[in-house]
Amino acid sequence: MLIIDSPSHNAFFNIASEEFLLTKFPTEDIFLLYINSPSIIVGKFQNTLAEINLDYVNENNIKVVRRMSGGGAVYHDLGNLNFSSHTLLGTNDFLDFGEFTSPIIRILKEWNINANLEGRNDLLVDGKKFSGNAKLAKGGKMIQHGTILFNSEMSVLSDALKINPLKFIDKATKSNRQRVTNLIDYLPKDATIEVLKQKLIDEILKDFAGKVYNLTDEDIQEIEKLAKEKYETWDWNFGFSPNYNFKKAIKIPAGFIEIHLDVEKGIIKKAKIFGDFFASKPIEELEDLLIDEKHEYENLNQILSKINITDYFGKVTVEEILQLFW
């Protein structure tokens, strides 16, 4: 088994690494470790906008990245250790999450922490979740990846993933929010995330006859290329979302305004605006302008900034109307 410790904290790079390693090592077992700067990783089949607090995410420069596997959205930061194991499909039970979580449990037991695998794919201590896991099959391989909350910013985690469930109506996989905890609350004072990472590397080296592999300059260039072409794009992170209906109402000095959108693959296909505002031009003109446009802040900001928005709503600003769309 090749053990790879990512040199990057960039979530785009690290999520791209998982796909790159499938093609680089089609038959090798791999154990990848990485730590991301603040980011939200959404499941492949999720509606990204319905999983994140977009205003908060943008204000705090939190990256949003869609991964290859299903399951729910998770928050990553520098207090969060992530692992990804790649094995040949068919050599392990696809639904068994125990093989690559058991080393974590053994390490924690050495620290007198009674952690265990509960349910299908979660690691818990004192009934609180500190690790969630997901799986996928691709290219003849099985990938299991998980996250370990070591000393993550819980308030940021909560705010970044706080959404209004009434805005979106869809059939996308929804995240199941559970009580979570940081391991730092249970560990000795001298324990650090780097100490935990090294202990996990040592355990994998011992259990799986592993050897350390350092990404080459060529590897890094290929991963960066894949990240730029796929994992950093709006098409993958937002446009890939399942179809959904969106609605929101706001009350501003100009009046009450409500919008309904039908969105397909991130593109607005139907738009209807209601309210008690006063318009000098038919609101249908504005609705038509929205059709076939991305349900994306900067794009809609550009569209609304090119017109006289007061013709449709009275005395309003573009910033006020943009509140309708998130």
Image: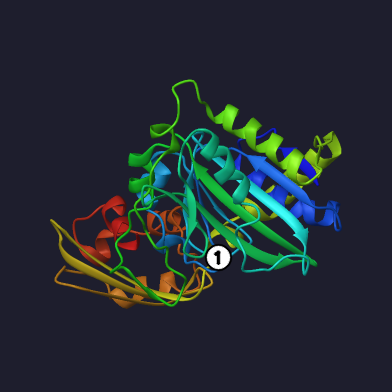
Q: Position of residue 254 (x, y in %)?
A: 15, 60
Horizontally, is 313 left or right of 214 in the view? left
**Residue found 54% across the figure and 35% down from its top:** 110
**Residue found 77% across the figure and 49% down from its top:** 30
Q: Position of residue 12 (x, y in %)?
A: 62, 46
Q: Residue 67 appears in which quarter of the rendering?
A: bottom right
Horizontally, is 311 left or right of 129 in the view? left
Of residue 258 and residue 196, the one placed in the foreground of this image is 196
Q: Amino acid at mark 1?
A: Gly
**Residue found 54% across the figure and 47% down from its top:** 147
In the picture of the structure, the residue carrying the numbered disc 1 is: 239
Q: Residue 168 appears in which quarter of the rendering?
A: bottom left
Q: Position of residue 262 (x, y in %)?
A: 41, 77
Q: Residue 171 appears in which quarter of the rendering?
A: bottom left
User: 141 above or below 18?
Assistant: below
Residue 260 visible in the snapshot: yes
Of residue 137 and residue 265, the one placed in the foreground of this image is 137
User: 269 above or below 156?
Assistant: below
Of residue 71 and residue 217, the one placed in the foreground of this image is 71
Horizontally, is 201 left or right of 171 in the view? right
Q: Quadrant of the C terminus?
A: bottom left
- Label 1, secondary structure: give it: helix
Q: Position of residue 269 (x, y in %)?
A: 46, 77
